[in-house]
Image (cartoon, rainbow, N blue to C red):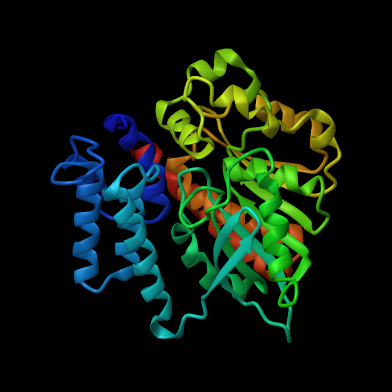
Amino acid sequence: MNDVDELKQFAVVHARAQNIGGYRTVLDRIGSDDPRGGPGSWAGEWQRAGEAQEAAGRLLEACRHYAMARFPYVDGPARQTAGERCVEAFDTWRTQDGRAIERLDIETDSGRIACWTAGLSADRPRPVLLIMGGIVTVKEQWGPVLVQAKRLGMAGIVTEMPGIGENTTPYDDKSRRMIPAVLDAVASRADVDHTYAVALSFSGNMALRCAAHDPRIRGIVTAGAPVDAFFSDRAWRAGLPRVTVDTLAHLTGTPPEHTVERMSGHIIDAASLGALDIPVHSVVSARDEIIPDADIQALRTHVRRLSLLNNDDVHGSPDHVVETRLWTVQSVLRMRRAQAAQRAVIGLLLGAARARRRLAGARA
């Protein structure tokens, strides 16, 4: 059972990233984390809000509420049901209004990888935009981005980290291999030799480790990715949020008190970082309570083609959601050396978002 106050704290960035209106009202109704659900519980209240959205025909909004109901991971029947309804709502939404989003299931020796895709074509293979969230994020949260992928001239693939959502592969130090498996599965319908990964938090760690072995990855945009000190600094891991440690323990099948120290196989050493010959763009939250500053310094010191967006914020930069989203798009366009007009438009939007935030701060 999770600490409710901590759940509320870390849920904010996910609610804002998904544009969930009125999320504070839902949070105010929650007073427990009974895994069976019910009134006043985390899963129960978020699912009730999702059902209201679904009854009103707002399927994407329902999907987002169900995703919050199963946050941070499935630990009982209520979150299991919420996760299933999240997928069902998204599946129904994608078929409306001719949205060209397809499902792709990839069977591997270690399990199934489920994806949502757009723009795959054997006749016109496009560069790949691969999107993955972190250890608490299901693919449906990022699925709507696929609507814009084709506008960028890319084939979009949204998937999940191992052990999350419908991904049944194990989360261990070999998990980076799932990325090549995804690329292999679409190689006949996409230009996988030009793959750009938007991989957040712990999936960013996977993408960085994979890029050292797979030259098809031409660029990575990440945010709050653990590198070395997160796993190796005993003093730092002693102060990690409980929800982070418990979620990792659930995914790795290890006791929480030993989870992080047993993840040493996920460490990216200086030589591996220095060997990366691709652009790496990363969002940095100055007050990140999960990723230590030493990991950011490791990127600064060893990654040759690094670009950073520094936010005075906590993990996930919940107060900078719009800017981070635009900066991510801008980063992908820069990596691909896209048309100047496209980059200019995003640059103007990013500048406007920053100006609005500064103005709001001045008024406050």
Residue 25 in picture, x, y percent from top left: 19, 47
Q: Is residue 239 above or below residue 113?
A: above
Judged left or right of residue 32, residue 71 is right
Above or below residue 354? Residue 112 is below
Residue 207 visible: yes
Quarter of the image that includes the N terminus: top left
Residue 321: % across, % down: 46, 48
Q: Residue furthest top?
A: 235
Q: At 22% from the left edge and 38% from the top edge, which residue is drawn? A: 34
Q: Residue at x 54, y 59 (%)?
A: 349
Q: Farthest front residue? A: 109
Query: Quick check: 133 left or right of 309?
Result: left
The residue nearer to you, when weighing 309 against 275, is: 275
| Image quarter of the C terminus | top left
Image coordinates of residue 323 in percent, x first then y, are: 52, 50
Where residue 109 sits, quadrant-wise, is bottom right
User: In this view of the protein, which residue sits in the foreground, 220 or 286?
Assistant: 220
In percent of the image, x 47 and y 44: which residue is there?
320
Q: In the displayed image of the protein, which residue is found farthest to the left? A: 39
The image quarter in which residue 179 lies: bottom right
Q: Residue at x 72, y 74 (%)?
A: 190
**Could you tell whether 202 is left or right of 43 in the image?**
right
- In the rendered image, residue 106, in percent from the top left (x then y), is placed at 61, 65
